[in-house]
Image (cartoon, helix red, strand yellow):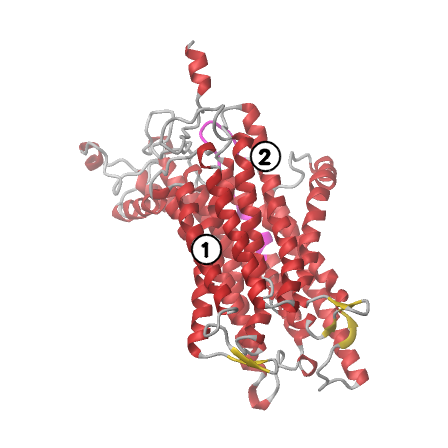
């Protein structure tokens, strides 16, 4: 009877919406996942539906030049990917994932609604004459308020949804544990389905029907996402928030400095750790001591003053696991930093690739024209194609060659993606060289129409970025999840997303510096309004060189990196 009662509830500490232990047969598992997957698919469709073509909206409706529009989009996109730190912190420390998602979805849909109003309501939308718009400062300000409400909303949701979906499977149950791996596959599939529809159908609507419909549809889709998420409320399992990870980090740093003059013992087993099997940190396994960053070990040295204190003062004495938790974060940071240049390359799909595509012939037959922003669909298709190829073919071949269970270590997988990304910039640069030669051959320097070269020649650069994404971005998410301390996984998953943010900011900085330097003495510069008189190819060569240097630094850091271990000798999968 006792065994039957135990099997009735989950064993991973999850609860239902009322805070009671979660009943296995009534909550979680695949029965809860359709609502989460539908929410993610709709949210990504809404996000990409309004962001993919945003650089053209800035140019057409806000009357901004190429450089300003590109910088505004990358700054906004960067903010979207730095906000996950806030969402992850609130979810892990205080609100839990469900209430964090629910709260930020309301902010999100408010931003989308306001953005729709700025493109459809008289007084909020700019007045246009013969295709030239003249927005007031107030109208421009409202657009940016809407965009940054969306950034806050998507940032709060992004680090929580995949983790919340994984919470629906009890790791102590072998059958549910296997289903959890399958969930992540379907989760990634949902993201790409949303992106596929957005970069094809919605971009066409924005360019051919109007921005009011183009932004209104994402708002409606996001409303569907909200409804879908709340419909599953009774079925969800919830992990309780475990307290602030930032406080624990601060305690180790403070304790280390307070014991600056204390000598470390030769016998590391004498460093402080509780005797119980579980760690003092809720929801975290104990970690083995490592020899790197020895100064931090001072926080775990037991002094005479510590022996006299009961209970232990956490700002003076920390466990080995707490110290190793901080060491794990410090070890991850250099790997994290090398993802910034990759994200800078990735961000070109929404800026420089679109501007380059605007000059090329978009016709498909006599009547249909494909918008330049829609070519990002080939990045999405590339990802959809490469994921099964990687999973079914590349991993099998690599497993035979390396003997590693996953084919490649996570670090090797990310490194391959960094190398591939260099070729995407080379492809874009070569295309621009050929385009400029056609301009010179036909004397099209001041021609306002399309260069006689099909826009579909851009497909290789998009497809190569998609391949690099499968290696680096997915490898990065997996690496950050596996190597993060157990009680900091949401926060470090959010940290991995900030490489996209910083990559966008770096792109803005590079464009600004390049423009300032190359326009001196009255020159037009590399990225003028008339790209036929510019040298966009030089910008792509610059990114290729930076990517190559970044790859070299990454190889050195990867060689130095030490994988984490738990005290039960359970190596994290590498």
Can you name the residue that lies furthest to the front here?
Answer: 122
**The one of 512 and 190 positioned closer to us in this rendering:** 190
Mark 2 or mark 1, earlier in chain: 1
**The one of 69 and 561 positioned closer to us in this rendering:** 69
Placement of 125 over or under 175, stated as above or below: below
Image location (x, y in percent) of residue 361: 76, 72
For mark 2, give the secondary structure.
helix
**The one of 75 and 15 positioned closer to us in this rendering:** 15
* Cβ–Cβ under 8 Å for marks 2 and 1: no
Query: Which mark's residue is nearer the viewer, 2 or 1?
Result: 1
Q: Residues within 10 Å of mark 2 (few under 14, many from 20)?
A: few
| Left or right: 559 as drawn, with respect to 459 | left
**The one of 560 and 319 positioned closer to us in this rendering:** 319
For mark 1, give the secondary structure.
helix
The magenta-colored residue range is 553-572
Can you name the residue that lies furthest to the bottom here?
Answer: 522
Q: Residue at x 62, y 78 (%)?
A: 527
Instruction: Tell me the quadrant of the picture where the C terminus can be found.
Output: top right
Q: Residue at x 60, y 71 (%)?
A: 56
Q: Quadrant of residue 287?
A: top left
Can you name the residue that lies furthest to the left here?
Answer: 308
Residue where numbered disc 2 is placed: 181
| Left or right: 224 as drawn, with respect to 291 | right
Give the distance between the C-alpha atoms of the residues marked 2 and 1, in whole angstroms.
29 Å
Residue where numbered disc 1 is placed: 108
Q: Residues within 10 Å of mark 1 (few under 14, many from 20)?
A: many
Image location (x, y in percent) of residue 511: 56, 73
For the question of whether residue 344 can be seen, the reply is no
For the question of whether residue 398 can be seen, the reply is yes
Placement of 83 over or under 190, stated as above or below: below
Instruction: Tell me the quadrant of the picture where the N terminus can be found.
Output: top left
């Amino acid at each position: 009877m006792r065994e039957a009662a135990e099997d009735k509830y989950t064993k991973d500490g999850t609860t239902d919406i009322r805070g009671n232990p979660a009943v296995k047969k009534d909550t979680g598992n695949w029965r809860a996942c359709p609502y989460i997957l539908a929410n993610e698919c709709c949210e990504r469709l809404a996000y990409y539906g309004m962001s993919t073509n945003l650089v053209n909206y800035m140019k057409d409706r806000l009357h901004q030049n190429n450089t300003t529009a590109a910088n505004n989009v990358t700054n906004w996109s960067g903010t979207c990917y730095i906000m996950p730190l806030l969402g992850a912190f609130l979810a892990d420390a205080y609100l839990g994932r469900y209430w964090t998602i629910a709260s930020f979805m309301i902010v999100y849909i408010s931003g989308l609604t306001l953005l729709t109003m700025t493109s459809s309501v008289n007084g909020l939308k700019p007045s246009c004459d013969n295709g030239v718009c003249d927005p007031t400062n107030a109208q421009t300000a409202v657009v940016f308020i809407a965009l940054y409400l969306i950034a806050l909303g998507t940032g709060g949701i992004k680090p929580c949804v995949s983790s919340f979906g994984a919470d629906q499977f009890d790791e102590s149950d072998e059958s549910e544990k296997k289903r959890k791996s399958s969930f992540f596959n379907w989760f990634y599939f949902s993201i790409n389905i949303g992106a596929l529809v957005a970069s094809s159908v919605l971009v066409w609507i924005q360019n051919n029907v109007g921005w009011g419909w183009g932004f209104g549809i994402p708002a409606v889709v996001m409303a569907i996402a909200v409804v879908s998420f709340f419909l599953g409320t009774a079925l969800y399992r919830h992990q309780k928030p475990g307290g602030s990870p930032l406080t624990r980090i601060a305690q180790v740093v403070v304790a280390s400095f307070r014991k600056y003059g204390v000598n470390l013992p030769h016998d590391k087993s004498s460093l402080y750790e509780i005797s119980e099997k579980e760690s003092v940190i809720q929801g975290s396994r104990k970690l083995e001591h490592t020899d790197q960053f020895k100064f931090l070990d001072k926080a775990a040295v037991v002094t005479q003053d510590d022996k006299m204190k009961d209970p232990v003062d956490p700002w003076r004495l920390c466990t080995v696991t707490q110290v190793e938790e901080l060491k794990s974060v410090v070890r991850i940071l250099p790997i994290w930093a090398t993802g910034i240049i990759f994200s800078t390359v990735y961000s070109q799909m929404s800026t420089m690739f679109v501007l380059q595509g605007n000059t090329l012939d978009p016709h498909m037959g006599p009547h249909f024209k494909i918008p330049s922003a829609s070519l990002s669909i080939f990045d999405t298709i590339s990802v959809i194609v490469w994921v099964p190829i990687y999973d079914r073919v590349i991993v099998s071949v690599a497993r035979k060659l390396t003997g590693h269970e996953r084919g490649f270590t996570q670090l090797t997988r990310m490194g391959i993606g960094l190398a591939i990304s260099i070729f995407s910039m080379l492809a874009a640069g070569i295309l621009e060289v050929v385009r400029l030669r056609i301009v010179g051959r036909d004397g099209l320097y001041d021609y306002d129409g399309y260069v006689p070269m099909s826009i579909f020649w851009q497909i290789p650069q998009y497809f190569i970025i998609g391949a690099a994404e499968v290696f680096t971005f997915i490898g990065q998410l997996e690496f950050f999840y596996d190597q993060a301390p157990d009680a900091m996984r949401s926060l470090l998953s959010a940290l991995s997303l900030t490489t996209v943010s910083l990559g966008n900011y770096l792109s803005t900085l590079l464009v600004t510096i390049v423009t300032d330097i190359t326009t001196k003495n009255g020159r037009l510069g590399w990225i003028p309004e008339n790209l036929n008189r510019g040298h966009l190819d030089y910008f792509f060569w610059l990114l290729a060189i930076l990517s190559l240097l970044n790859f070299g630094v990454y190889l050195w850091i990867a060689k130095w990196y030490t994988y984490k271990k738990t005290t039960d000798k359970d190596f994290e999968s590498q």
